[in-house]
Image (cartoon, rainbow, N blue to C red):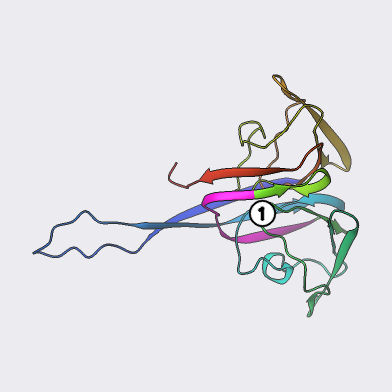
Amino acid sequence: MRTKALILTAALGAAGVTASLAQDPVYSVNAVGYINLDLPAGFALIANQLNNGGNTLDEVITGVATGTTFTQFDGSTFVESLFIEGFGWDNKTLTLAPGQAAYINSAAAQQVTLVGEVPQGELTVEVPAGLSMASSAVPQSASLVDLGFPASTGDSITFMRNGAFEESLFIEGLGYTPDAVPAVGEGFWVNKGAAATWTRNFSVNE
């Protein structure tokens, strides 16, 4: 699965500066953009790293082919939604928010464009013990060690790439073998011995 991301930064708002009261201008910065996901025929493990409304499927994933399926793991079972042209996703309760991940199954290769605002500030992703799906909460491609993902010896990360699973094992002091580097828009499986919170402080100004 190939991805391309474009982040557009816009400075919004300004402090009141008048002739009689000289103050430095103050700006509120929001970053919006898009992520193109080039999906192969069959299954891909994806993520959405931009906030769009309530991050429901109908808001996040639009314009896909009829018959495309979306599948999430809720900790004990798989939950599925089917895309129908003119109706959208048949399970209206599912979301794909930053930090979540899911399978998408396409009958033929297609491109999905995700649009929204880049999450900023203190961001947390709860990672339970055992098997779960997860992703970075921001659109960055880097080693999970550098991204601060909480891991202990014996924990593993598994990607699905080109129709095959790729597993990385974490060993304290050595990191992941091989290195675990998610792409922008890519989700992954986590197998952890103990629950943890993945916390990041992120700003587009950094």
Does dot 1 land on a helix, a strand or a loop?
strand
Look at the image and say whether residue 117 sits in the magenta stretch: yes
Residue pictured at 22% horizontal, 65% vertical: 16
Name the side, left or right, on which 47 lies relative to 35: right
Few, some or many C-alpha atoms within 10 Å of disc 1 (few <14, some 14-19, many ≥20)?
some
Residue topped by disc 1: 36
Quarter of the picture containing the C terminus is: top left
Find the magenta span and give its range.
Answer: 110-124
Left or right: where 79 falls relative to 139: right
- The residue depicted at 89 percent of the width and 55 percent of the height is 76
x and y, in percent, of residue 197 in the image:
67, 44
Residue 177 sits inside the magenta stretch: no
Residue situated furthest left in the rendering: 20
Q: 144 or 88: which is nearer to us? A: 144
Q: Position of residue 4 (x, y in %)?
A: 64, 48
**Vertical comparison of 19 with 161: above or below:** below
Does residue 185 appear anywhere in the picture?
A: no
Residue 61: quadrant of the picture: bottom right
> Nearest the camera: 94 or 166?
94
Specify the quadrant of the image occupied by residue 79. bottom right
**Residue at image coords 53%, 49%:** 122
From what the image shows, is residue 193 above or below residue 57? above
* Image location (x, y in percent) of residue 22: 13, 58
Where is residue 104 shown, x and y percent of the image?
82, 57
Q: Classify 150 as above or below 90.
A: above
Magenta span: predominant SS is strand
* In this picture, residue 30 sits left or right of residue 51: left
- Residue 119 in view (yes/no): yes
Q: Amino acid type of disc 1?
A: Asn
Residue at position x 63%, y 39% in the image: 141
84 vs 127, nearest the viewer: 127
